[in-house]
Amino acid sequence: MTVIAEEKPTTGESTPQTLITQYLSTLSYIERLHRLLLDVVKDEFERVRILDITSVQALLLFNIGDKEVTVGELKSRGYYQGSNVSYNLKKLVESGYIKSERCSVDRRTVRLKLTDEGCKIHQIVSDLWQRHVDTIDDNDLMSLGDFERLGQSMHTLERYWTDNIRYIY
Amino acid sequence: MTVIAEEKPTTGESTPQTLITQYLSTLSYIERLHRLLLDVVKDEFERVRILDITSVQALLLFNIGDKEVTVGELKSRGYYQGSNVSYNLKKLVESGYIKSERCSVDRRTVRLKLTDEGCKIHQIVSDLWQRHVDTIDDNDLMSLGDFERLGQSMHTLERYWTDNIRYIY
DNA sequence: TCAATTATTTCAGTATTTTAAACAATAATA
DNA sequence: TATTATTGTTTAAAATACTGAAATAATTGA
């Protein structure tokens, strides 16, 4: 009796696709995509000759948009990932992209809003993403369903990782 | 005659799922997952009381593994995303995690290898990922197919973004 | 009123990026 | 073969960015 091996499905060729190889590949993608995302934004601002802003700051301005938020919300809403918001905030206020004023109700909090210049930055980023989506759509690179599945998987990873970090901080 | 509106499909409730909302959501995930990935690694090394290494450095050591690479390859193979490899490299050599020696064939290049201590770091990270995969598998969080689709989507994004950065650098 | 909590800032130390220059080995060309 | 260009890497200084802890200040709740 001949046992038919099931272990090595011929997925085209190359390395066998296992959970671990796929997982490691995913981790690499996350690193590269993150870097690339910043590069794409940086590149766009060089293109339009705005040089007094970093990718991180531009994305922060984009995230704020037309909303009025407090410093704390920048972190809690995930608009800013770093540990010390004040640092980049100070720069953005100095460069005239954000205006801030103490809240009259709770005088501990500071309310932040984009200036007109800040809105311009927001618009540049917004247009960039819209162009991307248009191209992706026109060329059938990814469908809505693809994005939904992508979102689901990333959500799963996010939750798993969050749960696995010890609560020592 | 009553026109039945088709614009707002009731996807459960919440915001309508369009390409642009999905795209923006994807960008946010990439930022958060990247940060979380570094946190997960950092957390693990705090857990095992190794404090002289950063997440970025640990991932670099993990990427090198048992391979022998040159400095340039660290960048070209995507093992290190930062701009100045020498900087972190110097640290890792100083901390005794990497040993380097001139290549005898092309004497310009330097061949890098993990020391025994470096291999320990590699193993810690390797074990961490294996535990993750085991949990993900045991709890049916994601299937091989999920990972394959995830990889495909991320690959599409990577290529699109790479192509869209001007070749000015 | 006092302690606890929350929101934000400041600061010192550390890390990273950038830029430019230097250097040494190799490859290409005349 | 001499020369030039290219490649791989290092160094060093300055500019910029980030981190964690402590400080400040307003608010809340007992």
Image: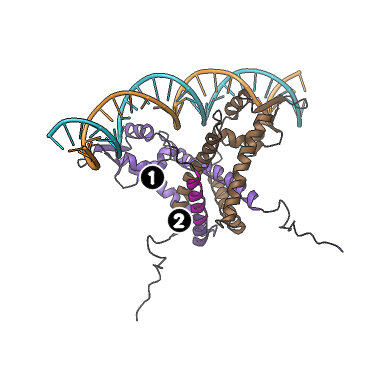
Chain colours: A brown, B purple, C orange, D cyan
Q: Nearer the viewer, mark 1 or mark 2?
A: 2
Residue hosting label 1: B62
Asked if badges 1 and 2 are on one and the same chain, I answer no
Say which residue appears at 65% left-offset and 34% top-offset. Answer: A120
Q: Is residue B121 visible?
A: no
Which amino acid, mark 2?
Answer: Gln
Q: Are marks 1 and 2 in contact (CB under 8 Å)?
A: no
Please tell me whether residue A50 belongs to the stretch shown in magenta. no
Residue hosting label 2: A22
Say which residue appears at 43% left-offset and 60% top-offset. Answer: A18
Q: For numbered disc 2, what is the local secondary structure?
A: helix
Chain holding disc 2: A
Q: Residues within 10 Å of mark 2 (few under 14, many from 20)?
A: many
Chain holding disc 1: B
Q: For numbered disc 1, what is the local secondary structure?
A: helix
Classify residue C11 by image quadrant. Answer: top right
- Please name the predominant secondary structure of the magenta segment in the image: helix
On the image, the x and y values in percent for residue B9 come to: 73, 58
Where is B86 relative to A14, above or below? Answer: above
Which amino acid, mark 1?
Answer: Phe
Q: Residues within 10 Å of mark 1 (few under 14, many from 20)?
A: many
Q: Which residues are magenta?
A: B152-169
